Image: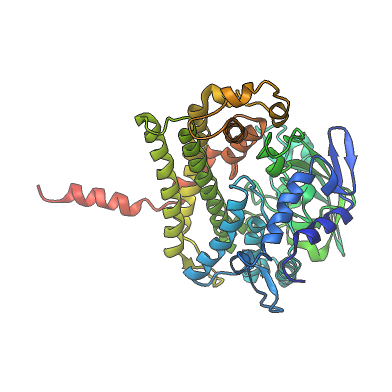
Amino acid sequence: MPARTGSQYLARLDDRTTEIHIDGEVVTSAVSRHPAFSSVARSFARLYDLQHDPAHRGDLTFPSPATGEPVPVSFLAPRTTDDLVRRRAGMQVWARDSAGFLGRTPDYLASALTAFGAAPAFFARAGDVFAERMLRYADRMREEDLLLAHTLVPPQVNRAVPAVRQGDGALATHIVHERSDGIVVRGARLLATAAPIADELLVLPSTVLRNAPEDAPYSFAFAVPTDAPGLRFHCRSSLHRGGGAFDEPLASRFDEMDAIAVFDDVFVPSERVFLLGRPELCNTLYSETGAGALMTHQVVTRTLAKTEFFLGLASSMAEAIGISGFAHIQQQIAELISYVEIERALLRAAEVEGTSNEHGVFLPRWETLNAARNWYPTHVAPRLTEIVRTFGASGLMATPSEADFAADAHGDLELYLQSATCGAVDRTALFRLAADAAVSGFAGRQTLYEQFFFGDPVRMAAALVGSYDLGPAQDRVRDLLDRER
């Protein structure tokens, strides 16, 4: 089957019997019509429809190596810089369509599977059968164009001890039985973003495992359908309160649901198990296959789109209320421009300076992407919302609803909420968008999500320092000190 349409995605979603718990309710069918999931499901359906839009399908698809049919370009295994650029062009279409607020669009985990499928030698180190399984699974996901979610983190019960020891080892997802035809797993994982509206759940290695006997039951990589028997999802409350596009312009479209995945003796058939009982392979899965680099390439493409959106939002607000000529406002808009151009430059530099790994996949330069993924959550993301709050100030609270305008018999709102460049309705719509981006519950979740997207920023910084070759820079200092005075 070639690249899916939105209606095909929604039909398959509603055919599933995924067990979803939300606000005291259990949902097992017609997920796309449930109030907590319907809006974001339609946003994902829109992404699938863009694959068939004549204006975008050339960017979003490429001929399948198996059938010649159009399949998502995120499954293109890059062999050159041009291939990386082609992948980015497709990822950019989707990222801009959601203004970067959807963090789990299909191209994110498709990028991981592309790297996994191109690295059979890595999986063969666990046995040839694991390489064959991974190849078949990656090919199937490409050809069927399925939406994948994933889950990584063990429950945060007592972080002073390893996950394998929490609750006497019973809390983190682990293998309880190995059978001739598969494995049985039990426990929980955080955080399965978008899993309630996904087709498949990838359960991949998360925290670093020690190469000790007690780690073996926690060392695996596998995939299950989201409606596998015994698998259930416990969701947070929806951040979309039911308003339309005027009242909740972002939450009504892009509230990706986050969930806890609980495995209640879930059976995983052998053909869906890609690593088993090999902690040392689990610890190097992302780096040695190149999955980490391709996934980060997608993430930086998305965060660039988000930064572009905030530049447009802040500058539009400044023009609307007549502050764009003030020096301190221009200084902050210049700051946003710098963020956009720096991110764009980092992406391009990573592509141009990429190299082929041992599996023949041309990867963007990791050091550059690693710097970008450390820089954005700590320096850029917090400033995007801070600048919008500074520009809007109390105006972000003076935002009547769409219904208020319809009921305003006295014309108060039209008179008192007009702006320097537009009428009251347009100004309010703009400021409600700003509020949803910077001060709402939806905005708060986005801030937390970006801050910890790749994990604890402190540990990420330590990993960046530990992996970066400081030798050349230090050699220059020594050369200068050693010169004759």
Residue at position x 86%, y 53% from top? 14
Report the coloring of the rendering: rainbow
Q: Position of residue 152 (x, y in %)?
A: 69, 47
Residue at position x 49%, y 38% from top? 316
Note whether 348 is above or below 372 in the view shown: below
Residue situated in front as seen by the camera: 95 or 144: 95
Q: Position of residue 56 (x, y in %)?
A: 61, 64
Note whether 154 is above or below 329 in the view shown: below
Residue at position x 66%, y 48% from top? 206
Note whether 292 is above or below 309 in the view shown: below
To which quarter of the image does residue 404 belong?
Answer: top right
- Residue 461 visible in the shown view: no
To which quarter of the image does residue 278 belong?
Answer: bottom right
- Residue 258 visible in the shown view: yes
- Which quarter shows the N terminus? bottom right
To which quarter of the image does residue 221 belong?
Answer: bottom right
> Which residue is at the far left?
485
Q: Position of residue 240 (x, y in %)?
A: 73, 36
